[in-house]
Image (cartoon, coloured by chain):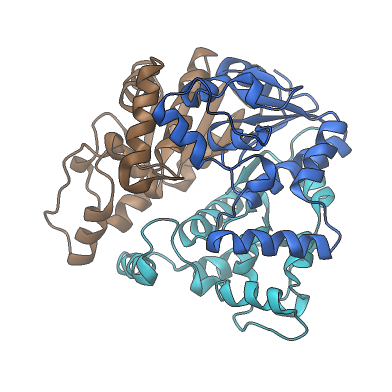
Chain colours: A blue, B brown, C cyan
């Protein structure tokens, strides 16, 4: 297969700094006119949460997973020096002072620029996350769909 | 070089969630008939341990490293919310409930499907891990062999 | 675009084990005569610090970020089992015993072999890191420059 003007990013982690990288890279790829897909898997799926957690219809252990997870893109911790939230708040403040976009802004911009958001349906299954807990306008796919895209992509990164 | 139907995955971490991704991606690649190699390096090497740790012929500090390492694929922690093993047990239970394969099953399936397992010989050297501590039927290679494979691969991921 | 004999590595983390992988892969790529660029971003930027931290002209919260960051390549922790520095010291000792190069040696070798070091200017902006805090002979670039390189590269890894 000849690689097309496509880029695929796997967002596996929920760390704010890694998620920022995912979105900055996705937006950058669109500015080079590459078709761009972000595959949200495992902890990365938390970035797609609507912001209000749902405990309905979940078993106790699934509820616990839900409780422990961050509450959407505005609630992601840092991968280093988190200090119970202080590090995250500080990074957000520093970004604002430099007029850099917040993750929420990058998220909205990526969507507007046509970045495709795909949720890993296996992870949804494991964590018992239902589609109405995640934001609208996203796709759901498994590993086969991922490969159908990735094997045609110019660059694939696991972040 | 024209990329061949090959995929190379670098397994650097011992986190259960990342190791699951490694194996799900490796198995997926085989189902697309891609030659697939997993390079186990640094902490990732722990997934290849036979399960019984060996302290023979090791110095004190090497023994300490051995003590601290997980005991093969059934003993890997999560990268987030580990809670002294509770998180890991919970994830395993959730996977079982959804009839999803455990890491051990994925491991066996990958092997059966012809995924090539390669251990980083430099890491073995640093940690003083001998070949009889690791499972049989694997290759040993350094960075040169890695590149000989990776530069011919359609996709290379560092996980 | 036809991929050229180029490799791009994104160094996002400051973990010693991951930074070792970055440099071993960069040096390996040069031995295959591939043009190699390391893009240091977020925490990875700490590997480029001169070693003496500067607090001049920084606000309180920027000073705190500076205080918490490792002090150049000789001060990086492990991603696992750090134990307040004991793990790192042990790994360094084990590497020395096996006559394996330290990160500082790998760093110097990479530079000598012509690996290009590029600092993410957005991260410098966020953290208020000035050019005189970082080592000499490096480039500064944003996401556009990254893509101009990466989209011509045979392999791109996010580490």
Task: Report how many numbered discs are placed on residues in the image.
Answer: 0
Residue C146 appears in the figure = yes
Residue C120 appears in the figure = no
Question: Residue C69 location, x and y as percent?
Answer: 58, 71
Q: Quadrant of residue A114?
A: top right
Question: Residue A135 location, x and y as percent?
Answer: 71, 27
B87 on left or right of C127: left
Q: Quadrant of the N terminus of chain B?
A: top right
B150 on left or right of C134: left
Residue at 64% in and 72% down: C65
Q: Which residue in the rendered view is the most extreme toward the front? A: A56
Residue at 43% in and 66% down: C101
Decide: is C52 above or below A107.
Answer: below
Question: Residue C153 location, x and y as percent?
Answer: 72, 41
C98 on left or right of A7: left
Residue at 54% in and 64% down: A83
Q: Which residue in the rendered view is the most extreme toward the left? A: B56
Decide: is C42 above or below B137.
Answer: below
Q: Quadrant of residue A141?
A: top right
C102 on left or right of B154: left
Q: Quadrant of residue C141?
A: bottom right
User: Closest to the observer: A95 or C109?
Assistant: A95
User: Closest to the observer: B107 or B35?
Assistant: B107
User: Closest to the observer: C140 or B125?
Assistant: C140
Question: Residue B32 location, x and y as percent?
Answer: 55, 14
């Amino acid at each position: 297969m000849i690689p097309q003007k496509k880029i695929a990013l796997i967002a596996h982690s929920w760390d704010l700094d890694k998620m920022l990288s995912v979105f900055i890279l996705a937006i950058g790829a669109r500015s080079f006119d590459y078709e761009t897909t972000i595959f949200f898997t495992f902890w990365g799926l938390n970035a797609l949460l609507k912001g209000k957690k749902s405990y309905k219809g979940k078993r106790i252990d699934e509820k616990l997973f839900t409780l422990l997870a961050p509450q959407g893109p505005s609630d992601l911790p840092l991968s280093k020096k988190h200090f119970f939230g202080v590090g995250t708040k500080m990074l957000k403040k520093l970004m604002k002072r430099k007029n850099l976009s917040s993750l929420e802004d990058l998220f909205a911009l990526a969507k507007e620029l046509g970045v495709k958001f795909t949720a890993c349906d296996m992870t949804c299954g494991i964590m018992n996350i239902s589609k109405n807990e995640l934001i609208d306008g996203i796709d759901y796919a498994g590993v086969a769909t991922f490969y159908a895209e990735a094997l045609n992509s110019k660059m694939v990164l696991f972040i």
